Image (cartoon, coloured by chain):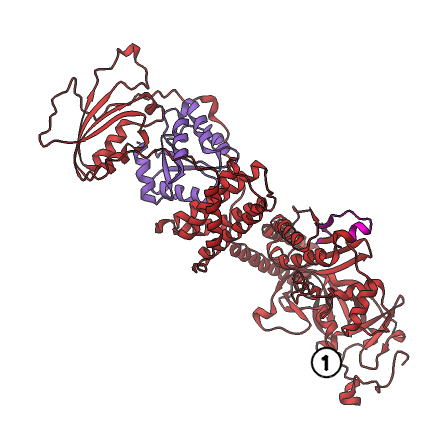
Chain colours: A red, B purple
Amino acid sequence: MNDFEQFKQTFFDECEELLQQFEDVAGTLQAGANDPAGLDDMFRSVHSIKAGAGAFKFDRLVKFAHELENVMDRVRSGRMELAEGDPEFIMQAGDVLQDLVAAARSGVEATAGLEDEALARLQAMLAGGAAQPAAPAQMESAGEAGSGDFRIHFRPHRAMYETANEPQLLFHALAVLGELTAKADLSKLPELAKMQPDEGYVSWQMELRGAPGLAEIEEVFEFVEGDCDLTFEPLAAAPDVAEEPAAVEAGPVDTPEAKPAAKTENSGPAAVQSTSIRVELERVDQLVDMVGELVIAQAMALDSLSELVDIRHVKQLQALEDLTMRTRQLQEGVMAVRMQPLKALFQRFPRIVRDLSRKLGKSVRLELDGEATEVDKTIIEELSDPLTHMIRNCMDHGLETPEDRLAAGKPEQGVVRLSAEHRNGRILIRVSDDGRGLNPEKVFNKAVENGLVDADAELSKEEIEALIFMPGFSTAAEISDVSGRGVGMDVVRRNIQKLGGRVTVESTEGEGSTFTLALPLTLAVLDGMLVSVAGERYVVPLSAIVETVCPDASAIRALPEGGTVMPLRGETIRLIDLCQSMNLSRLGQPEPLRKLAVIVETEFGRRVGLVVDELLGQQQVVIKSLEANYRRIEGVAGTAILGDGRVRLILDIDGLATMPVRNPDARPQDGDTANSEEATGGLSA
Amino acid sequence: MSKRVLAVDDSKTMRDMVSFTLKREGFDVVEAEDGVAAIEKSADGAYDLVISDVNMPRMDGITLVGKLRQDPKFRATPILILTTEADQEKKAAGKAAGATGWIVKPFDPDQLIGVVKRVCR
């Protein structure tokens, strides 16, 4: 069996698809009649899992899959109808199946008794249903007959030849079991002209000596049982081989094999190969890494040869340009390998919605859109939890109870919509509901209550709505066991940010809310803006940049608690001096007031200005983790190797925006009271 | 010339196992993922053996066996169906459709080769 060990990985990969397929249909099951094609799919999924599991001797999995398969077989063939409650149970059974597969995969024995309850119910379903048609009687076995010598009479019928069984091969198989002598009876052979190629004219009388047992002999004839006259008898001590009408050695009796010449017009199309192959993710990642290195090498080449801008080197430059283009294409191609449609992820939600709608007593319809949208696999994996949480949130807090909905003149059934699309090189995923929407007043009061904002703060509707993403904010007045597991929208936001994305909410009271996740297509490359500060270069994620302005020196104000702000079209923007934040020496650098302010938007939707010396240009960079290679640094999201061969830091905008202000001007004057009210100055300084 | 086998199964694991075992024995293996694909591949010439799963999307194994038997090229070709131990009905249905025999899942390489040798020269 060890020969097959190598296929375990394939098996488990396949199991994932099969389990998904099972679950997809299970989520649509209802009591009574169901879609036959779906039931077939479910049955086949379990069947394939069982077959594979058998090959690897995952006995518990086989046993459970076997019962589930039987139930599904009866349901699909109409011999069993799903009763009220059965669809839910089938889903649970799917979960158990999944757990058993997971246990088999991990090599750790599944919890004892894990499947017992479901197994018992499956068996009860089978026992309660129409009795399974009795299996055709097994071949009666003379079984006990031990080893020895046997006489075998064998007369094939036409049907045996029609199934391409050949006497000659059976003789070979018998000859392996013992010493075989065979005599053919050709007496029934007609004249050649009357002969039918696949009629059974010939019979054989055989003696097999030293056979291990009758069971082994019967096995040889297993496939032809019923298609021939066949008798076995133990050989008497004195074998009597007298009755032989026209004995012929059994050897080269050529079975009539009417093999018409193969049709030539069927020379046919080349075999259609399957359109996909399975590749381990690790290999793809290695490829992505290597291409990343290639991009860097190419950029370095470009950088170092940039002085060649000269008519004499036009050929070299053209070649270099060509290389640049090809490299970019190769990179895009390799990235595309990691892309997967969101379908697999989205398809988990019908079930979640179904379970939850029952639990909450709310009737909910889930609409899915844009499942074919492709996203980097890593991102898809990371999206499962946030999306699940958001959908739960919509159903628990967003949608009203059926009574409230009717009272509000809405259809009783609520709608949760999950959609995805590509836009401007990012992917947008929206989770929306047609529920009660956010009540700005309630949200604001809650935030005040939790000490997140001052009671007298004046916030716009958008700012108030954004408060729900603050740590410590819980929209549920009471924590329910549905969405209030101590995980709030702040965790969702953090998870999305980790992916280089952002989440926003738009809501109209009484009409519903829409949460929008904007994510990069891939985590491996980043479009960045290269900036310089005090002689150092940094990469600012392009997606965060709103605009760049040249602040009017006279408009910049220092804050009492340190830091500076500037007005921008009526808004007050906090300025973050990168020079300070990154602990750079300001000596010999241009005056801060002659600098540029790159206005960036934090994931929180707040705008801040990064004060830099110079914008050096836009560049796509390959992201390398700093944490993995060094350690985490506040305000830094990662690193990139640029064309000049040097490692540059990619700035973490949110990290920078939340870093405590290090104001060298405030500190020496006021020591530990830098934040106190007494610190002089103010907006009018 | 090595013998050609058409291995039909919607499960890649099963196809891999059958394929691996037979290739090691010197067979040329052509794979198909269901009955429809098998019919397509049957058009490109004769095979010395067909091994097919029963439960497959688009076209199941029993139907496939019946169709192949109608094709003069396959009239005398041994066709084995892959079935599970208890499935006497499937065995009978396979036989009725013209299957030469069956291979019981799960199988190990020796079992598979043992059965193949019983039906294939």
- In this view, the residue in front, B35 or A534, is B35
Crowd band around label 1 with a 10 angstrom C-alpha radius: few (<14), some (14–19), many (20+): few
Residue A442 visible here: yes
Mark 1 residue element:
loop
On the image, the x and y values in percent for residue A339 come to 61, 51
Residue B11 visible here: no
- In this view, the residue in front, A40 or A308, is A40
Residue holding disc 1: A585
Q: How many marks?
A: 1
On the image, the x and y values in percent for residue A310 come to 70, 57
The region drawn magenta spans A404-429
Q: Is residue A332 magenta?
A: no
Give above or below for A322 relative to A389. Answer: above
Give above or below for B20 relative to A551. Answer: above
Q: Quadrant of residue A155?
A: top left
On the image, the x and y values in percent for residue A42 come to 53, 42
Badge 1 amino acid: Ser
